[in-house]
């Protein structure tokens, strides 16, 4: 395939610095550029909001899955040793992550080793 010919950038005519531009055209160009910047900023803000909402939903789902696992293990008669403790730990970690996401600070019981609220007390 033949190589593409490229223009020499130095030979292109550039706008003359002293060229007079209609003030109305300059004002239109400035406002158009500002409007494009506002639209881009709004798009970035909306994308950030959607990302945050998706992360929140993911944390809620992880907590709900952990709650369901704990409750299922409590209903069973035979549970392997450590399985209940593992499920409780997973629940506490999911709940702590959700609380930290929603409030911006980890819950006091998460760092001190205190127990988390009971799973059975939580309403779906």
Image (tube, grey):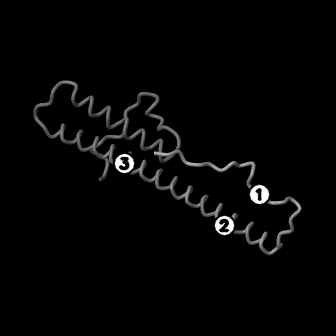
Query: Helix, strand, or loop for circle 1?
Result: loop
Residue position for label 3: 60
- From what the image shows, is residue 12 above or below residue 23? above
Query: Helix, strand, or loop for circle 2?
Result: helix
| Residue 117 in picture, x, y percent from top left | 36, 40
Q: Is residue 70 toward the left or the right of residue 100 in the image?
A: left
Counting residues from the start of the chain, the first of labels 2 and 3 encountered is 2
Graded by Cα atoms within 10 Å as few (under 14), some (14 to 19) or many (20 or more), the crowding at tag 3 reads: some
For residue 61, the mark is none
For residue 35, the mark is 2
Graded by Cα atoms within 10 Å as few (under 14), some (14 to 19) or many (20 or more), the crowding at tag 1 reads: few
| Residue 28 in picture, x, y percent from top left | 74, 72
For residue 13, the mark is 1
| Residue 119 in picture, x, y percent from top left | 29, 42
Counting residues from the start of the chain, the first of labels 1 and 3 encountered is 1
Q: CA distance from mark 2 to mark 3?
A: 37 Å
Q: Residue at x 66, y 66 (%)?
A: 35
Q: Quadrant of residue 92?
A: top left
| Residue 38 in picture, x, y percent from top left | 64, 63
């Amino acid at each position: 395939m033949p190589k593409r010919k490229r223009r020499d950038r130095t030979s292109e005519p550039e706008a003359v610095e002293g060229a007079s531009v209609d003030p109305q055209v300059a004002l239109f160009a400035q406002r158009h550029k500002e409007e494009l910047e506002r639209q881009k900023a709004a798009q970035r803000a909306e994308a950030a909001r959607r990302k945050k909402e998706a992360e929140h939903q993911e944390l809620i789902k992880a907590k709900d899955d952990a709650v369901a696992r704990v409750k299922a293990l409590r209903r069973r008669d035979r549970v392997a040793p450590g399985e209940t403790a593992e499920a409780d730990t997973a629940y506490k970690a999911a709940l702590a992550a959700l609380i930290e996401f929603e409030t911006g600070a980890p819950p006091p019981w998460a760092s001190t080793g205190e127990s988390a609220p009971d799973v059975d007390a939580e309403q779906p």
